[in-house]
Image (tube, rainbow, N blue to C red):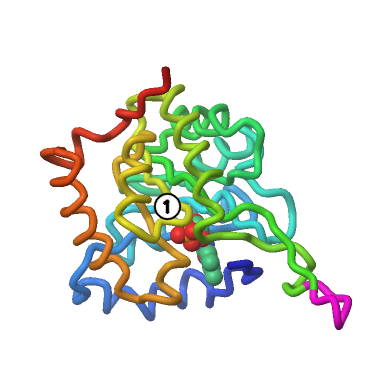
Amino acid sequence: MLNAIGIQNPGIERWVADFAPRIGSLPVPVWGSAVGTSPGEFGRVAAGLDSAGVIAVEVNLSCPNLAGEMFSLAPVSAAEVVEAVRAATLLPVGAKLSPNTVEIAAVAGACLGAGADFLVLTNTVWGAGIDLWERRPTVNGGIGGYSGPPLKPIALRCVIEVHRSFPDAAIVGCGGVATGIDLIEYLLAGASAVAMGTVHFAEPKAGRRIHRELKRLLQKIGAGSVRELIGELKLT
Ligand SMILES: Cc1cc2nc3c(=O)[nH]c(=O)nc-3n(C[C@H](O)[C@H](O)[C@H](O)COP(=O)(O)O)c2cc1C
C-alpha cells in the first residue's frame, strides 16, 4: 500500500475529550501515538495521551508525509524528541523509527540513550506511484509511505541490525506481517512482539488468524514458546 495521509487529527485537546471517556471500556489495552513538529509539541501530546489513560506512548518519529525533515533520520534529532516525551510521562515510551536511514542502529541507540523503553521497527519506506494516463503521482505530493509484504525484508533488516547492536532492547517488529510465518521471522530477527497495519485493510480480523497460525507453527517447529525464538537467528 502506498499512502500519504499526513496524520490528520483533531489536536490533542479534542482527542482527549473524545477518547478518554471511552478508553477504559475497550476490551484491549491502548497505546497512544504521539506526533508533532517540534520536541516540545511531542511532549505536550504525550502528556495528553497519558492523561487520557493509554498504557504506553509510541513516539512517531518517522511519518513520511509531514512537512520538514523526519526526526528519525538522524540520532540527534530523534534523541531530542524522545527526551521531551520521556520528561512528559512516566508511561513506557517507544520510539517508532524509519527504515529510510542508513544509520538505523545509531538512531536506535540515541533513542534508547534518551530514555526509550522500546523500539518499533519500522514505519513505512518512502515510495512513489505514477498514473501514466494523467501523468500525475498517485499520492498527494508525489511521495508517500510504502507498506505491506514488500516492506518485510527491509524492516527485518532493521530489526537484525538493531538487535545485533542492542541485544537487550525490546523491539516491536512491524512491516508486512500477514502470516504466522512472518511473525516468527520477526521473532528470530530479535523482535519480542509484532505490530500489523496494512493486512487489516483486506482482513480486519487478521490478528486472530495469525495467532492461530502461530500456535500451529510453534508445534510444527518444536518450539515450546514464543520467548525461546527471540533473537535465535543463526547469522554465522
Ligand atoms: C494507511 C496507513 C496509515 C498509517 N498511519 C500511521 C500513523 O498515523 N502513525 C504511524 O506511526 N504509522 C502509520 N502507518 C505505518 C504503519 O503503522 C506501519 O508502521 C507500516 O504500515 C508497516 O506495517 P504494515 O506493513 O503492517 O502496514 C500507516 C500505514 C498505513 C498503510
Q: Is residue 136 magenta?
A: yes
Mark count:
1
Quadrant in which residue 185 is drawn: top left
Whether ligand 1 has any atom under 8 Å from the Cβ at mark 1 is answered as: yes
Quadrant of the snapshot with the N terminus: bottom right
Where does residue 27 sit, x and y in percent of width and height?
18, 72
Q: Would residue 179 be found to the left or right of residue 199 on screen?
A: left
Judge whether residue 194 is colored magenta: no
The local crowd at label 1, few if under 14, some if 14 to 19, many if 20 or more residues have their Cα within 10 Å, is: many
Q: Which region is colored magenta?
A: 131-137
Front one among 168 and 115:
168
Please name whichever residue, 108 or 57, is drawn nearer the observer in this view of the structure. Answer: 108
The answer to whether 144 is drawn above or below residue 13 in the figure is above
Res 164 → quadrant: top left
* Residue 225, x across and y down, in percent: 14, 41
Disc 1 marks a residue whose amino acid type is Glu
Q: Is residue 162 above or below residue 52?
A: above
Residue placed under numbered mark 1 in the picture:
58
Q: Residue drawn 42% across and 17% down?
A: 236
Q: Going by the image, does 90 lie left or right of 221?
A: right
Q: Is residue 79 visible?
A: yes
Which residue lies most toward the right here?
135
49 to the left or right of 34: left
